[in-house]
Amino acid sequence: MSTKQSKANGNGARRDAVPTRFTYALKCYTAEIRTDGWWIARTTTSFGSEKPEWSGPFQSIETACLAIARRLATEIADRHTRSIEAHKLTPAQPLYGLKPTTRLRARKDASAL
């Protein structure tokens, strides 16, 4: 393998190049109204053996939607944290995009091991 090939991935872009964007496909949620309020769960396939894990009851559709939004925000933050760590982005770079109080994992000190 040549040096040129080893530094490029399948589409010709350099592996160590900083990406121009990050895109995240998110999970779908199902909302259900019952006699005691609104309930939410991640959507599962009808042919799968998974059972939905319902959360609730929520007093209103707005609070159910806020619960979904919090879960999606957590999912995006976790995935984006992995992306910025993999690409070694710093807070000064425009695609860093996380607040200082978000979900970055603490680095393990090699001397503590």
Image: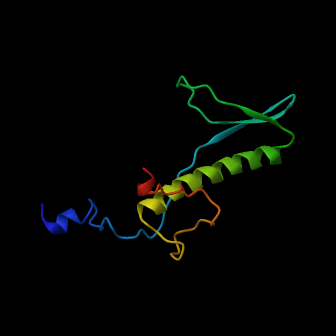
Q: Nearer the viewer, residue 41 or 79?
A: 79
Question: Which image quadrant is residue 31 in?
Answer: top right
Residue drawn at 57 percent across, 68 percent down:
97
Q: Is residue 75 left or right of residue 23?
A: right
Q: Nearer the viewer, residue 81 or 101?
A: 101
In this view, the residue farthest toward the top is 49
In this view, the residue farthest toward the left is 1
Q: How many numbered marks appear?
A: 0
Q: Is residue 34 left or right of residue 85?
A: right
Residue drawn at 87 percent across, 40 percent down:
59
Question: Which image quadrant is residue 98 in?
Answer: bottom right
In the depicted structure, whether residue 18 falls above or below residue 65: below
Q: Is residue 50 left or right of residue 11?
A: right
Question: Which image quadrant is residue 7 in?
Answer: bottom left
Q: Is the N terminus in the top left, top right, bottom left or bottom right quadrant?
A: bottom left
Residue 24 visible (yes or no): no
Q: Position of residue 74 (x, y in %)?
A: 63, 51
Q: Position of residue 104 (x, y in %)?
A: 55, 58
Residue drawn at 42 percent across, 68 percent down:
19
In the depicted structure, whether residue 34 falls above or below residue 93: above
Q: Position of residue 91 (x, y in %)?
A: 54, 72
